[in-house]
Image: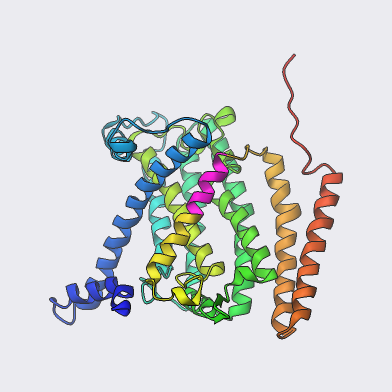
């Protein structure tokens, strides 16, 4: 019974395609999985938007949506109807074809990343040996979509927002890649399924998740920082800094096209949170061995939604950084820490079991963190925020 609950979606897929001829069953199974992904994550998007608006309302001592439906639950539907019926305005001088394709490219490339994420035991659309490489190849295409949006609008604010966004995303994508390389070094595989299986072991009931190692904890923190910047979330939401750039690269978008950018941002949050869960938090594995009876897909989506909650919490808590602070932080602090973490991961791998590797690896990372942080603060690269007023 427990096994059937764990594999209920796999069994349901096999049952549905069994009515078709044998030659069509593999194609039908893939198409069915694609339909589920395309329907599931936009539904989670609607739920996450409601959670964010209610959560930010509570943080800011207000109610949030409370007019459309009970507790405002139907507010995402009302927003969707408004986006569908709102007039689509395209600037006269804009490149209409590129202007139209930019949000489409963004959403399609983000959806492609879900294809290699193992969302449960035996629940992955494309189990590739180089799944992580495919994921980052698809993720890199989002920079192209952002630049297409800014350039095609023929608007200086849009172009400036796009250039800032591309600079930010490229800078932190390097960090994202390097923080993931440590996991590949330890696992010896680019397959996301094998990375989850490597963490699905227990000692005294506790899991062998990579986050519970010195290099894994450091890698996870740097991955989380880079993921926040990659998805343009606060405090790294500079590409759409309203006080400086109106609305950034999508200033000239309205109606359903703007809704696609909005959808793409949240889908990217889901995707990058799912990858972080897979790399550092054991994927679909249970947090304790005695909870292994809970279906694996429940654990994956629980960790995913917990990550989304942290994104929302940070948005309501942290102020926006300046552009120079953001770039200095990426290239002068986080990137060197990522490179050092690769060395620490190598030491962890070859020092063997025992407490010495815990002491050595932890000491290297802590000393580097304290030393680099103290040095940069003295040089005022990451100093206290200063406010200046016009006289």
Q: Residue at x 61, y 47 (%)?
A: 168
Q: Residue at x 30, y 29 (%)?
A: 87
Picture coordinates of residue 260 (x, y %)?
Answer: 37, 44
Picture coordinates of residue 121 (x, y %)?
Answer: 39, 75
User: Range of the magenta residues?
Assistant: 307-316
Classify 388 as above or below 258: above
Counting every numbered tag in the picture gives: 0
233 drawn magenta: no
Give whichever of 320, 106 is nearer the camera. 320
Q: Residue at x 66, y 71 (%)?
A: 213
Q: Residue at x 29, y 30 (%)?
A: 86
308 drawn magenta: yes
Picture coordinates of residue 276 (x, y %)?
Answer: 53, 63
Q: Quadrant of the N terminus?
A: bottom left
Can residue 43 be seen in the rendering of this structure?
Answer: yes
Give whichever of 282, 150 is nearer the camera. 282
Classify 372 as above or below 25: above
Give the prevailing secondary structure in the magenta stretch.
helix
Q: Quadrant of the C terminus?
A: top right
From the viewer's perspective, tell me whether residue 314 is left or right of residue 114: right
Find the residue positioned furthest to the top: 391
From the viewer's perspective, tell me whether residue 386 is left or right of residue 9: right
Q: Quadrant of residue 280?
A: bottom right
Classify 292 as above or below 389: below
From the viewer's perspective, tell me whether residue 322 is left or right of residue 55: right
Picture coordinates of residue 266 (x, y %)?
Answer: 44, 48
What colour scheme does the image use? rainbow
Can residue 98 be seen in the rendering of this structure?
Answer: no
């Amino acid at each position: 019974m427990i096994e059937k609950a764990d594999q209920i979606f796999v069994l349901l897929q096999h049952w549905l395609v069994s009515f078709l001829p044998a030659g069509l069953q593999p194609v039908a199974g893939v198409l069915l999985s694609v339909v589920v992904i395309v329907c599931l994550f936009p539904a989670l998007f609607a739920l996450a938007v409601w959670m964010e608006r209610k959560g930010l309302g509570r943080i800011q001592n207000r109610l949030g949506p409370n007019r459309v439906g009970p507790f405002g639950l139907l507010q995402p539907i009302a927003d969707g109807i408004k986006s569908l019926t709102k007039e689509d305005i395209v600037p006269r001088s804009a490149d209409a074809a590129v202007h139209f394709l930019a949000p489409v490219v963004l959403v399609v490339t983000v959806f492609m990343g879900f294809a290699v994420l193992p969302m449960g035991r035996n629940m992955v659309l494309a189990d590739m040996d180089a799944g992580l490489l495919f994921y980052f190849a698809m993720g890199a295409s989002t920079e192209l979509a952002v630049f297409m949006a800014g350039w095609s609008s023929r608007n200086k604010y849009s172009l400036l927002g796009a250039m800032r966004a591309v600079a930010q995303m490229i800078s932190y994508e390097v960090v994202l890649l390097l923080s993931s390389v440590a996991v590949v070094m330890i696992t010896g595989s680019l397959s996301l399924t094998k990375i989850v299986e490597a963490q699905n072991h227990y000692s005294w009931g506790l899991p062998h998740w990579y986050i519970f190692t010195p290099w894994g904890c450091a890698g996870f923190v740097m991955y989380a920082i880079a993921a926040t910047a990659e998805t343009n979330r606060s405090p790294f939401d500079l590409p759409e800094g309203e006080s400086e750039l109106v609305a950034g690269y999508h200033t000239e978008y309205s109606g359903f096209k703007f809704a696609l950018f909005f959808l793409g941002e949240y889908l990217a949050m889901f995707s990058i949170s799912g990858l972080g869960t897979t790399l550092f938090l054991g994927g679909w594995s249970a947090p304790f061995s005695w909870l292994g009876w809970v279906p694996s897909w429940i654990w994956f989506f629980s960790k995913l939604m917990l990550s989304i909650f942290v994104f929302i919490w940070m948005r309501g808590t942290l102020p926006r950084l300046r552009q120079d602070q953001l770039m200095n932080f990426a290239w002068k602090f986080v990137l060197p820490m990522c490179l050092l973490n690769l060395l620490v991961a190598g030491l962890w791998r070859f020092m063997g079991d025992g407490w010495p590797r815990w002491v050595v690896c932890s000491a290297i990372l802590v000393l580097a963190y304290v030393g680099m942080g103290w040095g940069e603060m003295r040089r005022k690269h990451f100093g206290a925020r200063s406010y200046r007023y016009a006289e």
